[in-house]
Image (tube, rainbow, N blue to C red):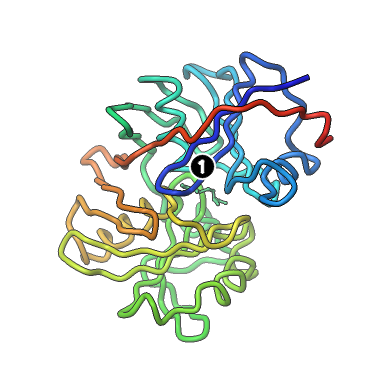
Amino acid sequence: MATPFVKMHGLGNDFVVFDARAHALPAMGDGLAARLADRHTGIGCDQLIVIEAAQNDGDARMRIYNADGGEVEACGNASRCVAQLLGPSKVETAGGVIEMNPAGDGATVILPAPRFDWDAIPLAYAMDTRDMPVGWDGLEAPSAVNVGNPHVVFFVDDLEAVPLKTIGPQIETDPLFPDRVNVNVAQIIGPDRIRLQVWERGVGLTRACGTGACATAIAAMRRGHVGRTATVEMAGGTLTIAWREDGAIAMTGPATTAFRGEVDLNAFA
Ligand SMILES: N[C@@H](CCC[C@H](N)C(=O)O)C(=O)O
């Protein structure tokens, strides 16, 4: 039986979105999400998104699967895409409730306040998460932030000089991060401008990472590198991140529908 999906992206970070409220879906665990995400033998995407009925007071629930098939807590770029599909709403995720405010060809989404406690990242043992006394091959003293999902952020003078494709997977799987981690390498290029490259947990290098942009901007604000609003420039484009007075994070940027299709999920079982 054919199941409809929407192929969307936020700045080139791409998603296959299913609406399980309208069409019953098989469980995405057990490798189904990874098979659908495969760019050679599946539909192809960085993350697979399933919209479900809300479990609490929200309007819907969003479940997120990385390309490796692992279910994760948050996805910033997919949140803006889901905002386009659902309209103004509150959406439950494993990383907290996200407020969706679609506008034009994009959205502003409000993420819960960032967490900095070492065991909320989580890290394997206690340490200062603003200036962590750790390093890997020249990448030193990062910050760690949980914005629904775990991020480590390195500030460097020359982004191009960092071999993130090589060092990203080493840091992602370091025992310091028991849930693994998204690895952000950032260069401050102005009082309110940051350049960023992200090695995403469970995916690899992506053209943009919404939660990475949030985590990086928050880490830069916490260190006093930028003010309470900053733009974050990535290979796929730019997001604006504001750390609001109430502690929540507002992320603004585009959300694009590439095409709509149908897939026989039995073929991927
Ligand atoms: N692309 C995303 C992040 C998706 C989840 C991440 N790879 C993780 O494992 O936490 C974004 O736009 O935030």
Q: Is residue 204 above or below residue 80?
A: below
Q: Is residue 129 left or right of residue 228?
A: right
Residue pictured at 17% horizontal, 66% vertical: 190
- Say if disc 1 is inside 8 Å of ligand 1: yes
Instruction: Tell me: residue 262, above or below residue 244.
Output: above
Q: Residue at x 42, y 23 (%)?
A: 90
**Which image quarter holds the N terminus?**
top right
- The residue drawn where x is 69% and y is 22% is 3
Name the residue type under label 1: Ala
> In the image shown, does 200 or 254 lie closer to the viewer?
254
Relative image position of residue 97 (x, y in whole percent): 45, 30
Residue indicated by mark 1: 74
**Image quadrant containing the C terminus:** top right
Left or right: residue 150 compared with residue 267: left
Query: How far from the left and from the top, in percent, is residue 221?
Result: 25, 59
Task: Determine whether the residue tagged by mark 1 lies in a helix, strand or loop.
Answer: loop
Query: Residue 60, percent across and down?
Result: 52, 20
